[in-house]
Image: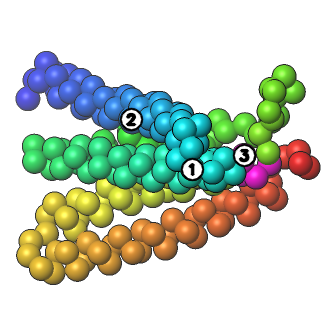
Amino acid sequence: MDWREKAAVGAAFVLKNVACSVFQLIVLGAAVVLQFILWLFCGQLTAHGFAFPAQASDLASYISWSVIFVGYAFVWYVFWWMVTQHGGRWFYWKMAFATIPLVAGLILFNPQQDPQAMIPLSAGEMKFRFSTIATGTVLFPLYAIALRMFVFQGEGRSMWKRAILAGLVIVVIGCLVFAASWHYVTNCLSFPSS
């Protein structure tokens, strides 16, 4: 293999992995836009008398976060399925590069209040956001590895049993990470007292 072939392979490696990071940013951006649209739609249900005003914000949150979670998981399911169908070359590198935007969001999280905001965020909402980012950052690679090992490479009835067990383990890990990150953010980051 001469230097041109090595350079071509190296360039393909970098481009495909950076494309995974860009795809993650696009999916996250689409999730934010979709959550805003769903939140507005649920607000319209309240305005037209389909829900009580006191329950509207809860209804909007439950619907929007549930749809976002299912949509995010489905988009990445399809992505990892396509990667596996094309040989799964550099799978772990692609997973690592797709995790970089999540890690960057966790590192860049700044819980400072904006004094110019009309409605400032509460400390609880900021803690929830940090814990959600931390949980997503930890669970994303576990989800990708579980899909690769138990769903895309397994066969038959035992494959589904292992996939369900892996899903339950991921849920337990997610609950533990969420609780640990909530405790961490309460004790280690500065929040306003409100």
Q: Residues within 10 Å of mark 3 (few under 14, many from 20)?
A: some
Q: Secondary structure at mark 3?
A: helix
Q: CA distance from mark 3 to mark 2?
A: 22 Å
Residue 61 visible somewhere in the drawing: no
Measured as percent of width and height from the top left, residue 118 is found at: 81, 27
Residue 112 in magenta stretch: no
Mark 1 is on which residue type?
A: Ala
Mark 2 is on which residue type?
A: Val
In the shown orientation, is residue 104 left or right of residue 126? left
User: Of circles 1 and 2, which is in front?
Assistant: 1
* Sequence-first tag of 3 and 2: 2
Q: CA distance from mark 1 to mark 2?
A: 30 Å
- Which residue was labeled with disc 1? 51
Q: Residues within 10 Å of mark 1 (few under 14, many from 20)?
A: some
Q: CA distance from mark 1 to mark 3?
A: 27 Å
- Which residue was labeled with disc 3? 126
From the viewer's perspective, is residue 99 above or below residue 59?
Answer: above
